[in-house]
Amino acid sequence: MAISLPSRQYLASFSERVPGYLFPLFLLFLEMFLRFAFNLNTKEFIGPTLSATGVGMIMSLTTHKSTKLPANIPQDVTNFIKDHNLTIEPVAVKVFKSVCWALILVLTLLWLGSIILSTRYPNEVWIYFPAHYYPGFLSFIIGFILSEVKEVV
């Protein structure tokens, strides 16, 4: 099985999505700067903020509508679908939405865990970072990956 490189169209559309992925990080750094400027603790909010961002990215994916039409349907059916502004929802899209809803529950629990870790154990460090950063990182990465999977489904 050969692995193909991303198409130019995908890369162009990815460049349009990048600001949406980076904007939460911009807000995170802005909040960090403001907390630093006003001499507030900046460590305790990063994990929960990243976790909430991950859940937020996945929430929008539950309404995903695929605009792709199967290649093997007759042209008159394709024209009818387009003329009447209809969509076909493949099984993959239905499965994707179900996975998103399940992960919303999981990521909400990660967010809750991150809040508990940041408030009860703010100085607990695992490896290099405070413990509450890890659920936030995981949530953000899952949200990012699923946002990209949506582009393929």
Image (cartoon, rainbow, N blue to C red):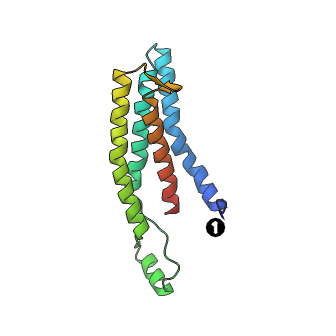
Q: Nearer the viewer, residue 30 or 114?
A: 114
Q: Amino acid at mark 1?
A: Met
Which of the pair 28/90 is nearer the observer? 90
Q: In which quadrant will I find the N terminus?
A: bottom right
Outermost residue toward the top? 39
Q: Position of residue 32 (x, y in %)?
A: 49, 24
Tag count in the figure?
1
> Which residue sits at x=45%, y=28%?
46
Residue indicated by mark 1: 1
Residue 136: % across, % down: 44, 35
150 lies left or right of 15:
left
Q: Position of residue 74 (x, y in %)?
A: 49, 86
Residue at position x 40%, y 77% in the image: 84
Q: Position of residue 35 (x, y in %)?
A: 46, 19
Above or below for 28 versus 1: above
Foreground residue among 58 and 74: 58
Vertical placement of residue 109 versus 127, above or below: below
What residue is drawn where x is 40% and y is 20%?
122
SS assignment at label 1: loop
Residue at x 50%, y 47% (from the top left corner): 144
Q: Label 1 crowding class (10 Å Cα cut-off): few <14, some 14-19, many 20+?
A: few
